[in-house]
Amino acid sequence: MNISLKDCIAPSFYPVHNSIKRGEYSSYWLKGGRGSTKSSFAAVEIVLGMVKDPKANALVLRKVDNTIRTSVYETLLWAIDMLGLNRYFDSIKSPAEITYLPTGQKIIMKGLDDARKLKSIRLKQGYFKFLWFEEAEEFNGMAEIRNVRQSTRRGGDKFVEFVTYNPPNDPAAWVNADSEIEMPDRMVHFSNYLDVPRHWLGETFFQDAETLRKVDPLAHEHEYMGVAVGRAEQIVFHGKWKELEFETPNVHSMYQSRFFFGADWGFANDPTTLSRMFIMAENGEKNLYIDYEAGGVGVEMEEIPELFDSVPESRKWRIYGDCARPETISYVKRQGFNIEGAPKWQGSVEDGIEYLRGFHNIYIHPRCTKTIEEYKKYSYKVDKNTKEILPIIVDKFNHYIDGERYALADYIKTQVSILDVL
């Protein structure tokens, strides 16, 4: 059997394929836009894995059962055909199953619209080595996925799970937020149509993508590039910031000759952060520049000084840190930093956001990658039933932004107008 995987797997998935061969992770989250071939890749890996392991079966899940036959069922048959294995497999549409004839191994496809269906699944041999949650954004959250794992992960010592999805446009959607959490047994992979050999998708596909990019860049960014850009009105700082490579001027040429420093604290899932910024008057505009950031998840208290020292002049200027952690502020202060707890008051978050939005522009240096990511994703809550954008800011993607609010807290609290600052 002569199989050329290069005809089935896009180059962007080679590292994932090799990781699966090495058994590095048990969970692979594959996210991307239209035409990224993430679902095709999962199907190929499942078919290959079953041929190589006579004990391996696969359970493939969609949220709704009646979507199976036009999605995962057809994709799996495509994978079998591409691998030249048609004569070794048999399939039926109802209930949706594919059987590997030499051993009787099964690929069983189910919808989770009725969770009781899982309890009736029986295997003649082996175990469900492979789980595939297709269009995972349609599921109700990690609790639903964990329930499937708990019901099916038994009888073997090696499991491979695929979670494939197009990131929902809401940056705060559960699948987007969960993919940001680092887990030791999970690889999160991102891809889009530009990673795929052009002839696989055809010229019409690329022309349609380019047309949408010109007429509706946000829709193109979401649908084709797989980025959760949110609806323009949902993103808190939409239209207020730009990524810009700039040279920081001599401090003595700036108004009040000063920098602003703000810190936020985290550990297990949230980062400890430090941001540096300054304000400039330019052509009648009052602009905020963010020129340095430092941050990391899992930063021990004794590691904070080294982290903060990576931001120039952080020992020279006052830092305003989150006052909710006075013990951390006290420790950092003892290490030689001029740091204080930032003042907070009722509505300080909303007041801070309004103040930041009051600048004509917020310019972020390209080296501040995490800050840029937050400005793309910081958003208002959306009613999941009506899709109405609510006047509630989601408490996610805001650790660097919180530090910026703290840094400017004195101006915000005393309602110093940005027009008065300069």
Image (spheres, rainbow, N blue to C red):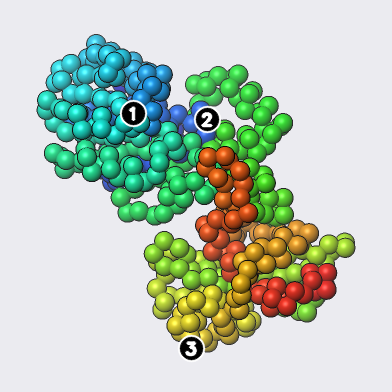
Under mark 1, the amino acid is Gly
Q: Nearer the viewer, residue 23 or 70?
A: 70
Query: Does residue 8 show up?
Result: no
> Is the N terminus in the top left, top right, bottom left or bottom right quadrant?
top left
Residue, x 83% and y 73% (percent of image)?
A: 420
Closer to the chain start, of discs 2 and 1, is 2
Q: Which residue is mark 2?
A: 34
Helix, strand or loop at mark 3: helix
Q: Check residue 155 in the rendering and tell me which mark sits there, or answer none.
A: none
Query: Does residue 328 show up?
Result: yes
Residue, x 52% and y 49% (percent of image)?
A: 172
Under mark 3, the amino acid is Arg
Q: Which residue is mark 3?
A: 334
Under mark 2, the amino acid is Arg
Lateral position of residue 86 relative to residue 233, left or right:
left
Disc 3 versus disc 1: nearer the observer: 1
> Is the C terminus in the top left, top right, bottom left or bottom right quadrant?
bottom right
Q: Which residue is mark 1?
A: 111
Q: Nearer the viewer, residue 73 or 244?
A: 73
Rendered location of residue 333, percent (x, y): 51, 86
Helix, strand or loop at mark 1: strand
